[in-house]
Image (cartoon, grey):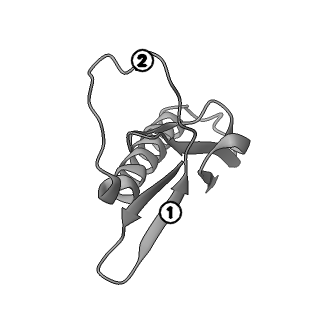
Amino acid sequence: MLLESRIDDRFTLLIDCESQGGVDKNAAGATGHPDRVLDNAVKIIRAAAERLGEGLSTAGSAAPVTMEVEFGVTVNQNAVVALARNPTDAHIRVKLRWDG
């Protein structure tokens, strides 16, 4: 299934999503809007980066000199954006690096 997300008046992003049957596991029942997929992905990436950065700053004097974290973001057929179970299966792969 292709999910169409309009970036602006000139560009459209097509995301290849698996159409899954069965019960929606999203307890809140919220669905995303296809045109906000990138905005929602950026929010998740920013929040994860800030949280990881905070963890590094409170690690004390033994903090690593360099740290690299990789994770993935997926989009489902309802335009819900979430962290992927496996970065290799993600629609968007993110690699964050801190040099101390």
Q: Is residue 3 visible?
A: yes
Identity, as a three-letter code, of the amino acid under mark 1? Leu
Q: Residue at x 34, y 53 (%)?
A: 34
The picture places residue 44, in percent across and down from the top left corner, at 41, 44
Q: Residue at x 63, y 38 (%)?
A: 63
How packed is label 1: few (under 14 Cα within 10 Å), some, or many (20 or more)?
Answer: few
Left or right, 65 with reference to 84: right
The residue labelled by disc 1 is 14
- Name above or below for residue 68 compared with residue 54: below
Q: Are marks 2 and 1 in contact (CB under 8 Å)?
A: no
The picture places residue 83, in percent across and down from the top left corner, at 52, 36
The residue labelled by disc 2 is 25
Q: Secondary structure at mark 2?
A: loop
Distance between mark 2 and mark 1 Cα atoms: 24 Å
The picture places residue 5, in percent across and down from the top left corner, at 39, 61
The picture places residue 58, in percent across and down from the top left corner, at 48, 33
How packed is label 2: few (under 14 Cα within 10 Å), some, or many (20 or more)?
Answer: few
Nearer to us in this view, 68 or 44: 44
Quarter containing the C terminus: bottom right
Left or right, 23 with reference to 31: right
Nearer to us in this view, 18 or 80: 18
The answer to which quarter of the image holds residue 73 is top right
Q: Residue at x 73, y 43 (%)?
A: 88
